[in-house]
Image (tube, rainbow, N blue to C red):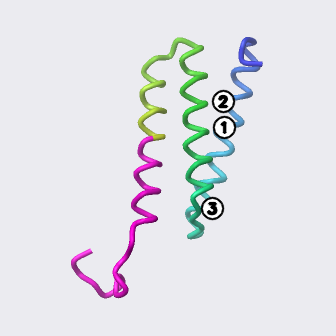
Amino acid sequence: MVHWPQGIDAAMQCYDNSLETCATMLATGYRSESLFQYMQRCYRQKAVIAEIQGRFPLVQTFSEHAREVADGAERDNAPRSPNAETDSSS
């Protein structure tokens, strides 16, 4: 599919739509390891598509976004203080 120009655009739009849905879920407070993994996968796939297109600055951008999602997932899963809401050191 990605070998056809319209296929590349359709694939990129699909990943954009998926990431928009994920962002909406995050905005509602939903968190899960599988959500973060899916977001990473979407950004990695977007990097692959950008590489096929020869759009190398985007490859780096999407790869960085995938790493940021991984970092966010690690922070989200980090143990929290039992008084996190009142703990001023966090």
In the image, 19 versus 69, the foreground residue is 69
Judge from the rendering whether residue 16 lies leftward or rightward of residue 6; answer left or right: left
Does 57 appear above or below 83?
above
Q: Mark 2 points at which residue?
A: 12
Horizontal side of residue 77 vs 9, given as left or right: left
Residue 72 position by quadrant: bottom left
Q: Which mark is residue 15?
A: 1
Q: Name the residue under label 3.
A: 25
Q: Tell me which amino acid carries mark 3.
A: Met
Q: Residues within 10 Å of mark 1 (few under 14, many from 20)?
A: some
Answer whether labels 3 and 2 touch (C-beta < 8 Å).
Answer: no
For residue 71, above or below residue 5: below
Image mark for residue 38: none
Tell me where the magenta segment starts and ends, as one range. Answer: 67-90
Element under disc 1: helix
Q: Could you tell me which residue is drawn at 58 percent across and 23 percent down?
A: 48
